[in-house]
């Protein structure tokens, strides 16, 4: 995913309205009355973007599987398949294919609960090699996050996984969208970097 950057000093906090955590799991939209899509507004798709040249289209079907396609200047760079937008099941990254088959029943984690800890095992196959890894997610908190004129409640989850891509960051997961819309990284100098999308819009039929 390609996101925008917001830098914060080590002791500075994100200024956003914090919502009651239970509302996050039965969320009410906090948004302008214009084009602010959600995963509940129909089986279709919407687009999130960092800049006009970089767009990710998100597709929904009947089940928990979600598909995303990232394009830069109309060139496809990355395609992913995700479970509820939170667990990656597969990706094609500029021709490199990675498959992640869950060994854990992912359905038991949903709907997400406040302060839960998640550990899920996957068999990961890449370039003919298969390894087992564990994805760990731990509740950090909740806050509101703005995408242009739209605002969504996000659940902050610390993600840890080691292969084939190393993650040790905080996901900003929007249950209304079933999508991670930003990531928070701790840098070596003590600063925090938030990399996130800046706009969202529906795909017109």
Image (cartoon, rainbow, N blue to C red):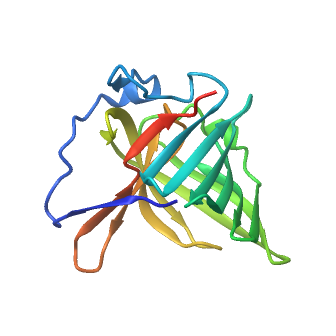
Judge by depth and name the residue closer to the eye, 115 or 150. Answer: 150
The percent coordinates of residue 83 (x first, y second) are 67, 44
Q: Residue at x 30, y 28 (%)?
A: 20
Q: Report the side of 100 relative to 72 (left or right).
A: right
x 52%, y 59%: residue: 1
Q: Nearer the viewer, residue 155 or 114?
A: 155
- Indicate whether 200 appears above or below 27: below
Residue 85 appears in the picture as rendered: no
Q: Residue at x 41, y 51 (%)?
A: 197
Which is nearer the eye, 196 or 45?
45
Q: Is residue 36 visible?
A: yes
- Quadrant housing residue 152: top left
How far from the left and from the top, in percent, is residue 110? 60, 34
Q: Compared with residue 124, is residue 21 higher up or lower down, i.e. above or below?
A: above
Whether residue 65 sits left or right of residue 125 in the image: it is: left
Which residue appears at 65% of the width and 73% of the height?
164
Location of residue 194 in the rendering, given as x and y in whole percent from the top left corner: 32, 59
Quarter of the image containing the C terminus? top right
Depicted 23 relative to depicted 133: above or below = above
Indicate the position of residue 185 as horizontal and vertical percent values: 36, 66
Instruction: Give whichever of 59, 134 is nearer the camera.
Output: 59
The image quarter containing residue 31 is top left
């Amino acid at each position: 995913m390609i996101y925008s950057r917001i830098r914060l000093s080590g002791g500075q906090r994100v200024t956003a309205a914090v919502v009651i955590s239970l509302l996050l799991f039965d969320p009410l939209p906090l948004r302008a009355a214009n084009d602010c899509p959600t995963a509940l507004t129909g089986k279709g798709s919407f687009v999130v973007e960092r800049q006009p040249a970089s767009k990710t289209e998100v597709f929904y079907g009947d089940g928990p599987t979600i598909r995303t396609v990232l394009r830069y200047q109309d060139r496809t760079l990355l395609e992913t398949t995700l479970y509820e937008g939170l667990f990656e099941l597969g990706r094609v990254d500029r021709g490199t294919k990675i498959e992640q088959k869950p060994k854990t029943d992912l359905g038991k984690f949903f709907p997400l609960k406040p302060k839960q800890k998640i550990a899920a095992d996957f068999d990961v196959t890449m370039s003919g090699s298969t390894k087992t890894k564990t994805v760990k997610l731990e509740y950090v908190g909740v806050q509101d996050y703005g995408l242009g004129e739209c605002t969504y409640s996000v659940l902050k989850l610390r993600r840890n996984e080691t292969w084939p891509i190393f993650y040790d960051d905080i996901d900003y997961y929007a249950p209304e969208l079933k999508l991670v819309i930003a990531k928070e990284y701790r840098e070596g100098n003590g600063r925090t970097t938030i990399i996130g999308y800046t706009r969202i819009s529906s795909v017109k039929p």
